[in-house]
Amino acid sequence: MLTSSVGRFRLLAMAEAVSWAGLLIGMLFKYALVENEIGVKVFGPIHGVVFVGYVVAALFASVQLRWERRTAFLALLASIPPFGTVVFERWAGRTGRLDGQAGAEDSAA
């Protein structure tokens, strides 16, 4: 999985979503339940590193797979809302954008 840019992209898309979940749970405990910030202190830096890794992996994948700018922009935009990376990864896989065969479909979609 880590030997190709597509594999790294897919792994980091899932990891980014998991780190988002951890950060959201940490924020729930910090701000709503017990006012303990350990979850945010643990998952904040983890999410930050994974977020940057996802952005880099998305840029590498966009170059290797020859995504149009719109697809690359959507991949980067997907990193902002929680679990958006999973939605984008599933969509990109389903539409062939992770196979390198969707160049013609990019402009039609």
Image (spheres, helix red, strand yellow):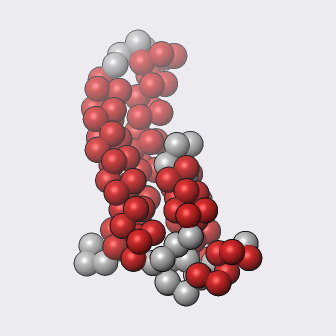
Residue 86 seen from this side: no
Answer above or below: position of 44 versus 98: above
Q: Residue at x 34, y 73 (%)?
A: 5
Depth check, front residue: 65 or 17: 65
| Numbered label tally | 0
The residue sitting at 55% across, 52% down in the picture is 78
Give the percent coordinates (x, y) of residue 84. Answer: 56, 51
Task: Identify the residue at image location x=55%, y=56%.
Answer: 73
Side (left or right) of 109 relative to 97: right
- Say left or right for 105 vs 68: right
Q: Quadrant of the C terminus?
A: bottom right
Which quadrant of the view contains residue 15? Answer: bottom left
Where residue 20 sits, quadrant-wise, is top left
The vertical placement of 47 against 54, above or below, is above
Percent x, y of residue 7? 36, 73
Of the 4 image quadrants, the one containing the N terminus is bottom left
